[in-house]
Image: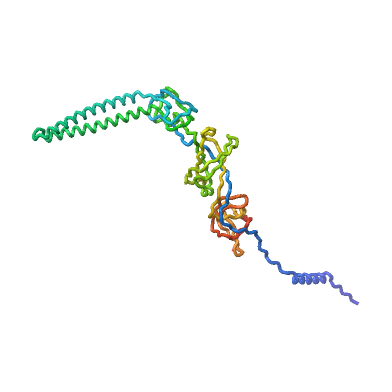
C-alpha cells in the first residue's frame, strides 16, 4: 500500500490568495479628497483704525545769524535763553574801514551833485538866451546839455554808491528778524568775524511761542488724511499729558527710502512748556479709503517677493497680487484686481498652491 503526502502549506497559500482577491472585489475604490478651505467674501469700504507714530517738535521759525561784513565784535547784548522781540538789537560790530568808505562816498556824491546843479543852471540860462536869434549857437547849447546829462548820470551813480555804503554800515548792527529765544551763542566782544566763515553762527534764534509737530506718515495712511484732520499727541516730558492739534501742512512728497510723507501740525506754546527737539507720540485716527476692499487680515500672504490673496473661483485657486492699507486685528484694506463678493481663502499661507 502506498501513501501520498499532500503539502498543506500550498493549500493554505491558495486559500489565502483566494480570500484576498475576494476582499479586493468587495472593498470600494478610494477617491482623492480635495482640500477644504474656509472662505471669506471680499467687501467694499475702508477700514477705520488708530495709528501710533513717533514725531518731533521743531521751532516754527529758526535762523542761524552769520556776519554780513568783516569786523570786530563790539558788544553782545544777548545770551542763551534771552527772549527778544522782532527788530531788537542783538549785537554791534565795528569796522572803521567801512565808516571811511561811507564818508568818501558821501563826499563824492555831494561834489557830483554840485557839478550837476551848476551844469543844469548853465543849460537853463543858455536855453533861455537861445530864444534870441543868433545869441547862442546850437552847438554850444548841445555841448552844455550833453555835459549836464553826463553829470546827472555820474551824480546818480555816486548817490547809489553812498546808499550802498550806508547799507553796509547798517550790517554792523545785528537785529532780530522775528521774536524768539536765543538758543545758541558762539561769539564774545573783541572777536574778529568774517562773512566768509560759515562754520558756526554767531547766534541761533528760534521762535518757541509756536512750534511745528513734524510727523512722517506711511504712504498708505497719508493718502487718507487731509488738512484740518485732528491729531492727538503725548509728550513724555509732560508726563503723558494729552494735547491736540490739526494737520496744517502736507509736504505732497514721498520719502523714497521710508515710503512716508511729512506732515506738520501747528502747536501753540504760549506758556513755553514745550521746546524744539522734544519727541512726541502721535495718535492718528484714519477713516480708511472708501474705494478700497477689505478682507480678513490672515487672508493676505506676504512673502519676500510679493503680497497676495488666494481667490477661489469655480473650485480653482488663483493668486492675486495686492497692496494693503489700513488694518486692524481682524481685517485689512487691499487694493488689486478684485471684485466685491469674490471669495478668498480666509486663513491663507504660502503652502497653498494655485490650481489649474
Say if 340 sits above or below 56 in the image: below
In the image: residue 341, left or right of residue 113: right
Which residue is at the far bottom?
A: 1
Where residue 3 appears, as percent x and y from the top left, is 89, 75
Horizontal relation, residue 270 to residue 111: left or right: right
| Residue 71 location, quadrant | top left
Q: What residue is shown at x 54% (from left), y 43% (from top)? A: 231
Which residue in the rendered view is the most extreme toward the left? 134
Q: Residue 209, image x and y in percent?
A: 49, 34
Q: Position of residue 97 (x, y in %)?
A: 33, 24
Single out the residue that lies furthest toward the right.
1
**157 on left or right of 54:** left
Please name the residue shown 24% across and 33% down the image.
153
Residue at x 56% of width, y 55% of height? 45
Residue 321 picture quarter: bottom right
User: In the picture, which quadrant includes the N terminus?
Assistant: bottom right
Residues 3 and 30: in front is 30
Residue at 62% in and 58% down: 40
Amino acid at each position: 500500500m502506498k501513501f501520498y503526502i499532500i503539502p498543506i502549506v500550498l493549500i493554505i497559500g491558495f486559500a489565502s490568495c483566494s480570500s484576498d482577491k475576494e476582499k479586493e472585489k468587495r472593498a470600494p475604490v478610494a477617491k482623492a479628497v480635495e482640500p477644504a478651505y474656509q472662505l471669506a467674501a471680499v467687501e467694499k469700504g475702508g477700514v477705520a483704525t488708530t495709528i501710533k507714530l513717533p514725531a518731533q517738535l521743531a521751532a516754527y521759525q529758526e535762523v542761524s545769524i552769520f556776519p554780513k561784513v568783516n569786523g570786530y565784535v563790539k558788544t553782545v547784548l544777548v545770551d542763551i535763553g534771552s527772549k527778544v522781540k522782532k527788530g531788537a538789537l542783538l549785537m554791534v560790530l565795528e569796522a572803521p574801514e567801512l565808516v571811511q568808505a561811507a564818508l568818501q562816498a558821501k563826499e563824492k556824491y555831494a561834489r557830483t551833485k554840485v557839478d550837476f546843479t551848476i551844469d543844469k543852471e548853465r543849460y537853463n540860462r543858455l536855453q533861455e538866451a537861445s530864444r534870441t536869434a543868433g545869441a547862442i549857437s546850437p552847438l554850444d547849447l548841445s555841448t552844455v546839455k550833453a555835459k549836464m546829462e553826463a553829470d546827472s548820470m555820474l551824480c546818480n551813480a555816486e548817490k547809489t554808491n553812498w546808499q550802498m555804503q550806508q547799507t553796509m554800515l547798517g550790517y554792523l548792527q545785528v537785529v532780530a528778524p522775528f521774536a524768539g529765544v536765543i538758543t545758541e551763542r558762539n561769539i564774545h566782544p573783541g572777536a574778529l568775524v568774517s562773512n566768509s566763515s560759515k562754520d558756526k553762527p554767531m547766534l541761533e534764534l528760534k521762535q518757541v511761542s509756536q512750534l511745528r509737530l513734524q510727523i512722517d506718515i506711511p504712504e498708505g495712511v497719508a493718502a487718507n488724511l487731509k488738512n484740518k484732520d485732528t491729531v492727538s499727541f503725548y509728550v513724555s516730558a509732560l508726563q503723558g499729558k494729552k494735547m491736540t492739534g490739526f494737520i496744517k501742512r502736507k509736504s505732497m512728497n514721498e520719502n523714497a527710502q521710508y515710503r512716508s510723507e511729512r506732515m506738520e501740525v501747528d502747536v501753540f506754546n504760549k506758556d513755553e512748556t514745550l521746546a524744539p527737539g522734544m519727541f512726541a507720540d502721535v495718535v492718528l485716527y484714519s477713516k480708511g479709503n472708501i474705494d478700497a476692499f477689505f478682507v480678513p487680515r490672515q487672508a493676505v500672504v506676504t512673502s519676500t517677493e510679493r503680497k497676495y490673496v488666494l481667490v477661489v473661483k469655480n473650485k480653482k485657486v488663483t493668486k492675486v497680487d495686492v497692496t494693503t492699507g489700513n488694518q486692524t486685528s481682524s481685517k485689512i484694506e487691499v487694493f488689486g484686481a478684485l471684485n466685491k463678493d469674490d471669495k478668498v481663502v480666509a486663513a491663507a499661507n504660502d503652502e497653498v498652491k494655485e490650481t489649474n
